[in-house]
Image (spheres, grey):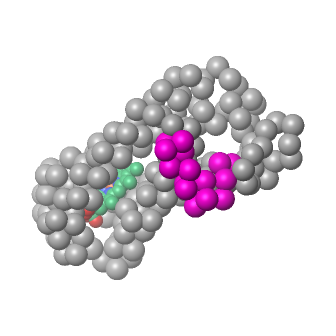
């Protein structure tokens, strides 16, 4: 498979921003490792579920800054990839096997947009302008819980994706763009 330069560039920018998002997301999570459903929730209300993490408020400052920065890089980078992919008919003709197609399409058109949209719902500046986001997700706390699970699915995809591409000997195709006949 020959990967065009734009696919390779956006793929690796996406990976770097994803690592930053995962690390900073975990830093933010430590400040409040409890999840709720609906509009509201706090330490003094019952949680839908709770993670066995010690509450740590020290990491949330840089965590939020990095999460915000990396999220916008990921969104802009993703829009460039999507725009180009639609314009060049890359999505229509990329020669993946059915299972690869299903996994990549599910991530690009399903889990990634869901993570971005639920993440935007957690930004008071964004929901002040677009309160409809609360109705889509059934409240701020539901959006946070959905964001958490969608991000976990992406981490799971990443683990399987890395194992599969290494096992199939494809990694260099995404670095150098070489043609791999597999
Ligand atoms: C969050 C992180 C990642 C995401 C969301 C992601 C997503 C994707 C997507 C959507 C494609 C298809 C690209 C296209 O043809 O348009 C792809 C291909 C590929 N990715 Fe990733 N990727 C990630 C991280 C990685 C990492 C860390 C590696 C290194 C092992 C990797 C190696 C590859 C390779 C080798 C291909 C081409 C596979 C093939 O030709 O079948 N990816 N990735």
From the viewer's perspective, is residue 42 above or below residue 55? below
| Quarter that holds the N terminus | bottom left
From the viewer's perspective, is residue 58 above or below residue 72? above
Quadrant housing residue 182: bottom left
From the top left corner, tell me how far across and down residue 45 is, in percent: 86, 42
Left or right of residue 175, residue 100 in this image? right
Query: Residue 181 in magenta?
Result: no
Front residue of 13/89: it is 89
* Residue ID at (70%, 25%): 56
Q: Which residues are magenta?
A: 126-141
From the viewer's perspective, is residue 62 above or below residue 10? above
Query: Residue 127 in magenta?
Result: yes
Dominant secondary structure of the residues highlighted in magenta in the image: helix
Quadrant housing residue 50: top right
Whether residue 119 can be seen here: no
Left or right of residue 107, residue 152 in this image? right
* Residue ID at (60%, 23%): 59
Left or right of residue 1, residue 99 in this image? right
Left or right of residue 105, residue 10 in this image? left
Whether residue 34 can be seen here: yes
- The outermost residue toward the bottom is 98
Front residue of 130/62: it is 130
From the top left corner, tell me how far across and down residue 151 is, in percent: 53, 51
- The outermost residue toward the top is 58
From the top left corner, tell me how far across and down residue 104 is, in percent: 36, 66
* Residue ID at (58%, 61%): 136
Front residue of 80/121: it is 121
Q: Quadrant of ligand 1?
A: bottom left
From the top left corner, tell me how far across and down residue 84 is, in percent: 19, 59
């Amino acid at each position: 498979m020959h990967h065009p330069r734009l696919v390779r560039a956006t793929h690796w920018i996406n990976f770097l921003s994803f690592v930053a998002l995962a690390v900073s997301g975990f830093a933010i999570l430590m400040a409040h490792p409890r999840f709720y459903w609906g509009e509201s929730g706090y330490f003094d209300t019952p949680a839908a579920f709770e993670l066995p993490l010690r509450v740590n408020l020290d990491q949330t400052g840089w965590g939020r800054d990095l999460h915000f920065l990396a999220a916008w890089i990921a969104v802009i980078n993703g829009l460039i990839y999507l725009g180009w992919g639609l314009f060049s008919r890359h999505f229509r003709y990329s020669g993946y096997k059915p299972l690869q197609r299903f996994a990549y399409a599910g991530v690009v058109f399903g889990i990634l947009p869901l993570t971005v949209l639920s993440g935007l719902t957690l930004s008071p500046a964004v929901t002040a302008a677009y309160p409809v986001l609360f109705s889509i997700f059934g409240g701020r706390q539901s959006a946070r819980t959905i964001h958490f699970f969608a991000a976990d699915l992406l981490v799971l995809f990443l683990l399987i994706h890395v194992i599969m591409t290494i096992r199939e000997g494809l990694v260099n195709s995404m670095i150098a763009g070489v043609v791999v006949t597999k």
